[in-house]
Amino acid sequence: MDSVQFDNAGIPMAGNLYLPPEFDPAQQYAAIISVHPGGGVKEQTAGQYAERLAAQGYVTLAFDASHQGASGGEPRRLDVPTNRVGDTFSAVDYLTTLPYVDNNRIGILGLCAGGGVTIKAASLDRRIKTVATVSGIDVGATFRRGWNGTATVADQLAALEGIGGLRTAEAGGMTPAYGTYVPELGDTTAPRDLQEAAEYYLTARG
């Protein structure tokens, strides 16, 4: 695994590049970009998939989204789906600069919230020839309609009012408020899959 950096409209992006066994730089390989879940980083799930896919003969890239992890971008911890689509375009840009990557065989894998990102990116960037997701989720739809898709229009309008109020308060000097993707550990009122996500993301592992 090699630590790499590439540009995203002036934002330095941090990635981990994985090469196949018995890698030969004189050959050309199919490549796969592994896009991490919301709130994740390249060393977690995205990196695990990238490592395993590299073992199957692909050049693979896992990277931190802009504003997150070791990538640049201010403010920190910002997670905007459209920004992440742009991040993905820059990852494709980077792969096309590698002489051992076959530009006609670049694919993309999206994990959880990265799934919606990959679908959107693949619909706009014709350089992406294939797309797959694992537990893919459309974050925009989730924010609009709630985790189970049951939010009413009134609920959605109330959420927008609240967001507008927070932005106004922050513009007036209030410390920025941060939302979370997953509930607190042990919150049994949350949907079961979110409880499992909390256990996965918030439990330290050796």
Image: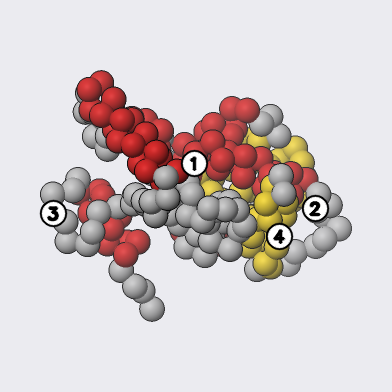
Q: What SS does tag 2 mark?
A: loop
Out of 68 and 94, give the one closest to the viewer.
68
Which circle, 1 or 2, is nearer the viewer? 1
Q: Residue at x 71, y 40 (%)?
A: 105
User: What residue is pinned by disc 3?
Assistant: 188
Identified by mark 3, the residue type is Thr
Dot 3: few (<14), some (14–19), or many (≥20) neighbours within 10 Å? few
Identified by mark 4, the residue type is Gln
Identified by mark 2, the residue type is Leu
Q: What SS does tag 3 mark?
A: loop
Q: Is residue 203 left or right of residue 191?
A: right
Identified by mark 1, the residue type is Val
Q: Residue at x 78, y 45 (%)?
A: 96
Callouts 3 and 1 close, C-beta under 8 Å: no
For the N terminus, the quadrant is bottom right
How is the structure coloured here?
secondary structure
For the C terminus, the quadrant is bottom left
Instruction: Name which of mark 2 and mark 3 comes first in the sequence.
Output: 2
User: What residue is pinned by disc 4?
Assistant: 5
Callouts 1 and 2 close, C-beta under 8 Å: no
Which circle, 2 or 4, is nearer the viewer? 4
Spatial CA distance of label 4 from label 3 is 41 Å
Looking at the image, the residue that sits furthest to the top is: 153
Instruction: Name which of mark 1 and mark 2 comes first in the sequence.
Output: 1
Q: Is residue 55 left or right of residue 179?
A: right
The quarter holding residue 187 reads bottom left
User: What residue is pinned by disc 1?
Assistant: 80
Q: Position of residue 198 (x, y in %)?
A: 28, 58
